[in-house]
Amino acid sequence: MKQLQEFFKDQTIQSILDVGCGAGDFIKVLNDTFGSETQLLGIDPGEVWLREARARFPQENMEFRCMHGEKLAFENDQFDLVSISNALHHLAQLEQTLAEMKRVVRSSGWLIVNEVIDGELTEAQQNHRMLHHFKSYVDRLHGITHRPTWTEQEIMDLAEANGLQVKHAFLHLKMKQVNHDELFLDDKYRQMESLLEELQGRPEFDEKKDQLPLFKERLKQHGFHLAPQLLLIAQA
């Protein structure tokens, strides 16, 4: 990611902690940015995700551990950089996790927050939001913490409220172009269909069942495009 490389070109970053790393998507971004001499540690509470991450990234400078962000098993001031990418809206204890991130980063170190945004989206990006918000709705019915996405300003306000001093911020796209491929769009439709099936037998099913044909028609008309992401570079 060119913006990251440009910002950190004169900084020495030797150790990075990525909180809520999932299957390691942002670990790859960090490794591409800082190189193989930087030690990367990803943590996540989900062993299924960690197994995938370990299989994808067997490099010696990468390690993955099962751990919750709200209670990091590290000393104070341990890492040069601590990041969290597209995981804030999954956190049951958001403020505590950010406080832990600030605790384990060195006093002169850096914090990165990367989050998909809501707001002024194209029609194709609204299809991403529609699927994402449907997933978050179903997860919450199952008792899983999964908030809808925030606007750019809401993310900035959240960072400030939790003591992050933002030094640089920029929007970026993970998917560069709208995807109109029939097989790809069918997969997105099947994801929505599978989520709706989870509501069978619940009163919410009748409330939400009209979303499926609407989503299918929207995919046909507009295609699918991942919503932009906001990346914040901050210090505590």
Image (cartoon, rainbow, N blue to C red):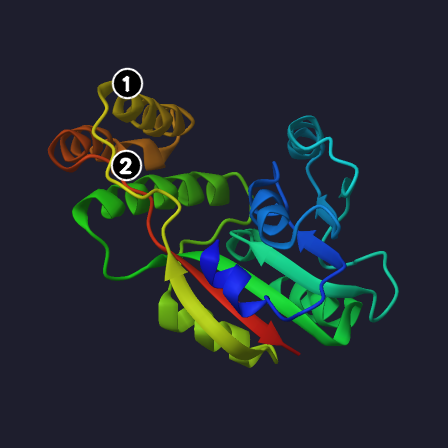
From the top left corner, tell me how far across and down residue 154 is, in percent. Answer: 41, 71
Q: Secondary structure at mark 2?
A: helix
Residue type at the position of mark 1:
Leu
Q: Earlier in the sequence, mark 1 or mark 2?
A: 1
Q: From the viewer's perspective, is residue 48 above or below residue 122?
A: above
- Identified at 30% across, 24% down, the residue is 184
The numbered mark at residue 183 is 1
Point out the image quarter for the C terminus. bottom right
- Identified at 26% across, 47% down, the residue is 125
Residue type at the position of mark 2:
Lys
> Who is closer to the viewer here, 70 or 64?
64
From the top left corner, tell me how far across and down residue 131 is, in percent. Answer: 33, 39
Question: Dot 2, crowdedness within 10 Å: few (<14), some or many (≥20)?
Answer: few
> Who is closer to the viewer here, 69 or 180?
180
- Identified at 59% across, 77% down, the residue is 164
Q: Is residue 105 visible?
A: yes
138 sits to left or right of 69: left
The numbered mark at residue 208 is 2
Query: What is the spatial separation of the Cα atoms under label 1 and label 2, in whole angstroms?
Result: 24 Å
Q: Secondary structure at mark 1?
A: helix
Q: Is residue 92 visible?
A: no
The numbered mark at residue 213 is none
From the top left corner, tell me how far across and down residue 40 is, in percent. Answer: 73, 49
202 sits to left or right of 128: right
- Identified at 51% across, 65% down, the residue is 6
- Which residue sits furthest top? 183
Q: From the viewer's perspective, is residue 193 above or below residue 82?
A: above
Q: Nearer the viewer, mark 1 or mark 2?
A: 1
- Which residue sits furthest front? 10
Q: Are marks 1 and 2 in contact (CB under 8 Å)?
A: no
